[in-house]
Image (cartoon, rainbow, N blue to C red):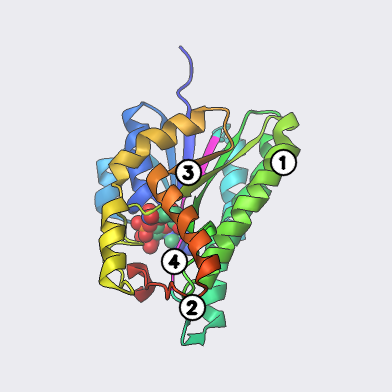
């Protein structure tokens, strides 16, 4: 009998990470979940999932996890690095503390896993997948840390994919949004029109999982989903060049956390 495939997912307490945990378990995959919070009701629901509790910014915990997993010969082959935050850091005044927290989580939290995992995974067909965003194309001017961190991981993964392919490693990017999760639902929009448009283009986590899972198994480096939002954001980025400053931004719901 062949061993089931094994995926590690960061941030499975809600949203895309939780959707992935459910979808991969339903497919019979082995799942390791990395969460900063213990959620007993979630863990009771998935007794076969291996839950670890630490913050993705905590490099020592990342190292400890890989050391233990390698010793136990339980290293996952797929790494869905989904944990992330979106906070307002540039509304009226620029907050370096908030900017740093977002970049540390969304960029360093991803690179912590990548840097520690690479030596363990060379020549083993490992796949890293990062959750980037349509904010790469059309940024919210109130959320500079989010924009920069998602753009950075996108560019880093593009280059790492070329560099490490020969060693059997892939670096894939999800350009997502908007998806109805805690990050976006209930955010304050700049205008009623903006709210109406966002409601129209937002998709559910469930709708997002099949395209993501197909993409992870594919040979492709990036996935833009949903396509209609991607097209809209490309159009809006062109419009910004004609009317600079027309978009005043919005405040994501998660910025209150
Ligand atoms: N929703 C969208 O439209 C969209 C679009 C583009 C990209 N993304 C990206 O998709 C990823 C998942 O977001 P989501 O939309 O599913 O939002 P979400 O429902 O808020 O989920 C975020 C997850 O990340 C975890 N997390 C946050 N900071 C962490 C840390 N320092 N260490 C460990 N875990 C941490 C959260 O844990 P807690 O429960 O403890 O807070 C939660 O499990 C994010 O990287 C986000 O930027 C989302």
Q: Which residue is mark 2?
A: 89
- From the image, tell me which residue sits under label 3: 224
Q: Position of residue 134 (x, y in %)?
A: 47, 55
Whole-number angstrom distance, CA of label 2 to CA of label 3: 26 Å
- Say which residue appears at 75% left-offset and 39% top-offset: 163
Q: Which residues are magenta?
A: 78-87
User: Which residue of the protein is positioned furthest toward the front in this rendering?
Assistant: 242
* First along the sequence among labels 1 and 3: 1
- Residue at 24% over, 51% down: 41
| Residue 210 magenta | no
Of badges 1 and 3, the one in the foreground is 3
- Secondary structure that dominates the magenta span: loop
- The quadrant in which the C terminus is found is bottom left
Q: Quadrant of residue 87?
A: bottom left
Q: Secondary structure at mark 4?
A: loop
Residue occupied by mark 4: 86
Q: From the image, tell me which residue sits under label 1.
A: 119
Camera sees residue 102: no
Q: Quadrant of residue 27?
A: top left
- The nearer-to-camera label among 2 and 3 is 3
| Label 2 vs 3, first from the N-terminus | 2
**Mark 4 touching mark 2, by CB under 8 A?**
no
Task: Tell me whether the residue at label 1 lies in contact with that at label 3, contact meaning CB atoms closer than 8 angstroms.
Answer: no
Identity of the residue drawn at 72% across and 41% down: 119
Q: Are marks 1 and 4 in contact (CB under 8 Å)?
A: no
Is 238 placed left or right of 168 in the picture?
left
> Which quarter shows the N terminus?
top left
Give the mark nearest the N terminus, 1 or 4. 4
Q: Quadrant of ligand 1?
A: bottom left
Q: Is mark 4 within 8 Å of ligand 1?
A: yes
Disc 3 on helix, strand or loop? strand
Q: Secondary structure at mark 2?
A: loop
């Amino acid at each position: 009998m062949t061993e089931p495939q094994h995926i590690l997912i960061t941030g499975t307490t809600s949203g895309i990470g939780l959707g992935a945990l459910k979808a991969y378990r339903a497919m019979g995959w082995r799942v390791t979940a990395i969460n900063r919070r213990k959620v007993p009701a979630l863990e009771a629901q998935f007794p076969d999932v291996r839950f670890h509790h630490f913050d993705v910014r905590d490099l020592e915990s990342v190292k400890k996890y890989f050391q233990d997993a390698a010793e136990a010969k339980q290293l996952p082959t797929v790494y869905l690095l989904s944990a992330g935050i979106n906070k307002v850091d540039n509304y009226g005044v620029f907050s370096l503390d908030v900017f740093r927290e977002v970049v540390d989580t969304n960029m360093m939290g991803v690179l912590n896993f990548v840097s520690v995992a690479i030596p363990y995974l060379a020549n083993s067909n490992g796949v890293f997948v990062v959750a980037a965003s349509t904010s790469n194309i059309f940024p919210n001017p109130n959320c500079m840390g989010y924009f920069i961190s998602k753009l950075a991981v996108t560019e880093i993964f593009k280059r790492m994919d070329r560099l490490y392919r020969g060693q059997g490693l892939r670096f894939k990017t999800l350009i997502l949004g908007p998806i109805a999760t805690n990050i976006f639902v209930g955010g304050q929009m700049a205008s009623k029109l903006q709210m109406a448009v966002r409601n129209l283009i937002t998709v559910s986590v469930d709708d997002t999982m099949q395209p993501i899972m197909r993409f992870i198994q594919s040979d492709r480096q990036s996935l833009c989903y949903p396509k209609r939002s991607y097209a809209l954001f490309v159009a809006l980025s062109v419009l910004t060049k004609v009317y600079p400053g027309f978009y005043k931004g919005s405040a994501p719901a998660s910025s209150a956390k």
